[in-house]
Image (spheres, coloured by chain):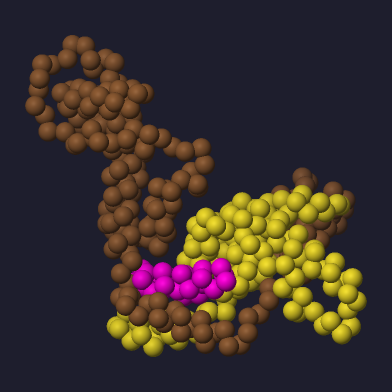
Chain colours: A brown, B yellow
Amino acid sequence: MTHLGRTELVDYVEASPALSQDHRRHVETCETCRAEADVLRTVRALAQADHAPEPSPLFWDHFAARVSDAVRDEVPGTASQAGTRWFATWVAAATMAVVIMMTVVWRTPLHAPGPVAVAVPVVDATGTDPSAFLIPDDVEADEAWAVVRTAAQDLGWDDAHAEGLDARPGAAEGVALELTADERFELGRLIDEALKRNGV
Amino acid sequence: MALVEACLAGRREAFDALVQRHQRHVYQLCYRFAGNHEDASDLAQDAFVRAYRGLNSFKGRSAFGTWLYRIAVNVCLNRAALRAPKLAALEFADHTDHRIERADTTLLRAERAVEVRAAIARLPKKQRATLILRVYHELPHEQIAEIVGSSVGAAKANFFHALANLRKLLRVRS
């Protein structure tokens, strides 16, 4: 029998009834697994030995009063809709960013032969800073992502689905493909302008 | 669920009762992430305020405590400042009977506690949350999986990796 996996080792260390008899018998005869389990048990015991201090009994009344004050002017159950709106805004922005990036990739064949001065209604992206769409190396350190994460953290998936928000593979590509050639050309031109203006 | 419904119906005292019932656990959880009393009480308050605002998204599919833990874990993990928690040294000694323990033993225990907390603070987020919920709150893996949004198997694997990483950070030898 092969050695215990990660979940089986955890079950063994915690004496969980979920561990099968076969695995239990294996540990009895396998020094490697027993040594591994012993180390995990030791580390767990080390962590467990650290007790957090108990605040003063007076703290709890003070704390409850603080929370009560903090929610005094709040209406219970108002975060979900707000979160959904934020989430929807973010999904729309992310989709737009992907469309723009894909258009940049496609713009070379779109330039030739280009149509002459076509007036097409296009989302105003001229004021958009292209660097805003770059994914930072450490996404957790990105403030924009922190805003999105904070807004979405209380949003349940069920609520999101109820609002029609879900991520489907290829959704962004689908949006891009719905643009006409003229629209793609105009979008490419706007992006070119923005890139030149920013010296990219 | 009755308290939640009462709260949504506008009875503020119902939320006060929920706070009274859960404040200790939420505070203790936040303390494990923050490492000091001031930040822990701020985080716990934030968790309750967010819970209040999001009460109508609680559908009763899990226990209210589980739902609240989930919010508190998210609040703690999202607080950027907690990447380098300000650990309150020696506070742990409050649980020790100083009359019978030698001073050097107390000091060693305190140093070890600070090392352990610093090591836990360096764990990846999900591993840290899983370890705290399992070791200090003794929650079953099933409930931890609900809180961190993973499968039970993934919760156990996270716990394994948390212990394995802690072993390296604390240089525990076999």
Looking at the image, residue B125 lies above or below residue A132? below
Residue at 86% x, 52% y is B174
Residue at 27% x, 23% y is A192
Q: Nearer the viewer, residue A178 or A186?
A: A186
SS assignment for the magenta stretch, majority:
helix
Is residue A30 shown in magenta? Answer: no
Q: Nearer the viewer, residue A17 or A177?
A: A177
Total marks placed: 0
Q: Nearer the viewer, residue B43 or A179?
A: B43
Is residue B45 shown in magenta? Answer: yes
Looking at the image, residue A174 lies above or below residue B136? above
Report x, y in % for residue A178: 20, 32
Q: Residue A69: which quarter of the image?
A: bottom left
Is B172 placed left or right of A115 in the picture? right
Residue A19 can be seen in this image = no
Q: Residue A184: which quarter of the image?
A: top left
Is B143 placed left or right of A157 in the picture? right
Residue B48 can be seen in this image = yes
Report x, y in % for residue A108: 29, 16
Q: Can you say which quadrant of the picture contains the C terminus of chain A?
A: top left
Is B66 placed left or right of A78 in the picture? right
Is B17 placed left or right of B30 in the picture? left
Report x, y in % for residue A195: 31, 25
Magenta stretch: give its range: B38-65
Residue at 46% x, 45% y is A142
Residue at 52% x, 87% y is A61
Report x, y in % for residue B56: 34, 72
